[in-house]
Image (spheres, rainbow, N blue to C red):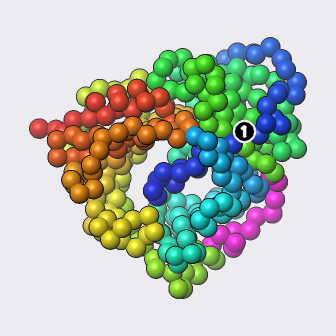
């Protein structure tokens, strides 16, 4: 539940504010019917895609906190987005539909690539929500206030151990997701995100996104080659399926050497990325040839609700990343086999 720019795909977790920790109008949880679940989640999804808004959001995951300014505009069926980090190394991200430009002003490096936006806060929903009730129970908790806006609060509880639960605050008027928490099986908050201030329905300013994407004079520009494919076409098969997760996208990416997060040795590397989703949670599986100088230790890493599992498989190096329990990542990796 986050804007995921993962190296360039790995990214940020998000923050819950202590002042919002208690429900303003506590009520008995009300279970929602399947059609109601679909309506609620589609409303949240549509608001993130079709509403104009701008504000500051703060992120907390694994004891780390980060804040950013974001602006989103929709005009004539196109989407425009601008994100600027407010902490740490300066980074600006501009998006026009699926074209994304990531700029590091300090190093004068820019990366231009086509990228699908799956499961991004404040959108979350990948499909139409029809199947979510099979794996999640959704209840309406009541009302609250976030960043000065009246909000409806939903509890999304996992029905099995393969996924986490969520608590969502959606703006009453627009449906825009204002705050979100990722919860473990004991309903402890693992990762959270919220707008500290936000304006909804602002005037569209697409030029504030498009112009910076074109003015890259003085930047070293990297354009990673990306092609859509399918993991079976690349010689892979998943013998073991994780309940509820479906394949939603697969790309093959050839890395350049000029971006600030890649070294000279990255030039020419090809990485296969396959994305699976249950509608809310997403898992990415990265596959690349094993390189002993680069790939030295198998491990499991955690940052809030996001876990990363790296493991060698024959002559390949597998990296699984997802906002899911570690056991779920293990199932994905164990099920991945090279076709004979």
Which element carries disc 1, helix, strand or loop?
A: loop
Q: Quadrant of residue 121?
A: top right
Asked if residue 193 lies left or right of residue 288, the reply is right
Q: Nearer the viewer, residue 260 or 49?
A: 260
Residue pictured at 39% horizontal, 65% vertical? 262
Task: Tell me the quadrant of the picture where the C terminus can be found.
Answer: top left
The residue carrying pointer 1 sits among few (fewer than 14), some (14 to 19) or many (20 or more) residues within 10 Å by Cα, namely many
Query: In this view, which residue lies farthest toward the left?
Result: 340
Query: In this view, which residue lies farthest toward the bottom?
Result: 218
Q: Nearer the viewer, residue 178 or 58?
A: 58
Does any portion of residue 126 appear in the rendered image?
no
Relative to 124, does residue 185 appear above or below in the rendering?
above
Residue 298: where, in percent of width, then height? 30, 41
Magenta-colored span: 198-210
Residue 20: where, in percent of width, then height? 81, 35
Asked if residue 1 lies left or right of residue 6, the reply is right
Does the segment drawn in magenta span residue 95?
A: no
Does the segment drawn in magenta span residue 203?
A: yes
Residue pictured at 31% horizontal, 34% vertical? 333
Residue pictured at 54% horizontal, 35% vertical? 305
Q: Quadrant of residue 320?
A: top left
Q: Nearer the viewer, residue 183 or 62?
A: 62
Relative to 63, does residue 72 appear above or below in the rendering?
below
Does any portion of residue 63 appear in the rendered image?
yes
Residue 281: where, in percent of width, then height? 52, 35
Task: Tell me the quadrant of the picture where the N terminus can be found.
Answer: top right
Judging by the rendered image, the residue that carries numbered circle 1 is 16
Residue pictured at 27% horizontal, 56% vertical? 294
Relative to 55, does residue 268 appear above or below in the rendering?
below
Residue 332: where, in percent of width, then height? 34, 32
Asked if residue 164 lies left or right of residue 267, the reply is right
Q: Quadrant of residue 241?
A: top left
């Amino acid at each position: 539940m986050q804007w995921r720019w993962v190296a360039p795909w790995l990214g940020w977790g998000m923050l819950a504010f202590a002042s919002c920790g208690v429900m303003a109008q506590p009520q008995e949880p009300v279970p929602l019917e399947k059609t109601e679940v679909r309506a609620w989640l589609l409303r949240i999804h549509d608001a993130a895609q079709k509403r104009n808004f701008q504000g500051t959001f703060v992120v907390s995951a694994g004891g780390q906190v980060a804040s950013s300014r974001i602006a989103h505009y929709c005009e004539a069926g196109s989407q425009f987005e601008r994100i600027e980090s407010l902490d740490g190394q300066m980074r600006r991200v501009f998006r026009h539909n699926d074209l994304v430009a990531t700029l590091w002003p300090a190093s004068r490096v820019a990366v231009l690539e086509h990228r699908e936006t799956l499961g991004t806060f404040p959108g979350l929903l990948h499909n139409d929500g029809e199947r979510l009730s099979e794996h999640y129970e959704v209840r309406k908790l009541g009302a609250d206030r976030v960043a000065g806006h009246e909000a409806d609060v939903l509890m999304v509880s996992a029905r099995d151990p393969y996924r986490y639960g969520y608590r969502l605050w959606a703006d009453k008027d627009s449906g825009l997701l204002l705050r979100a928490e990722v919860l473990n099986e004991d309903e402890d908050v693992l990762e959270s995100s919220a707008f500290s201030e936000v304006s909804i329905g602002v005037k569209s300013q697409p030029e504030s996104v498009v112009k910076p994407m074109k003015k890259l004079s003085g930047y070293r520009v990297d354009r990673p080659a990306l092609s859509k494919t399918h993991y079976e076409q690349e010689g892979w098969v998943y013998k073991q399926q994780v309940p509820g997760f479906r394949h939603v996208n697969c790309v093959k990416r050839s890395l350049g050497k000029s971006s600030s997060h890649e070294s000279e040795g990255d030039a020419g590397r090809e990485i296969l990325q396959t994305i699976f989703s249950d509608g809310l949670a997403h898992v990415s599986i990265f596959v690349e040839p094993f390189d002993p100088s680069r790939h030295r230790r198998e491990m499991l890493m955690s940052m809030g609700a996001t876990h990363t599992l790296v493991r060698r498989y024959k002559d390949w190096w597998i990296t699984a990343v997802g906002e899911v329990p570690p056991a779920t990542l293990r199932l994905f990796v164990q099920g991945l086999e090279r076709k004979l």
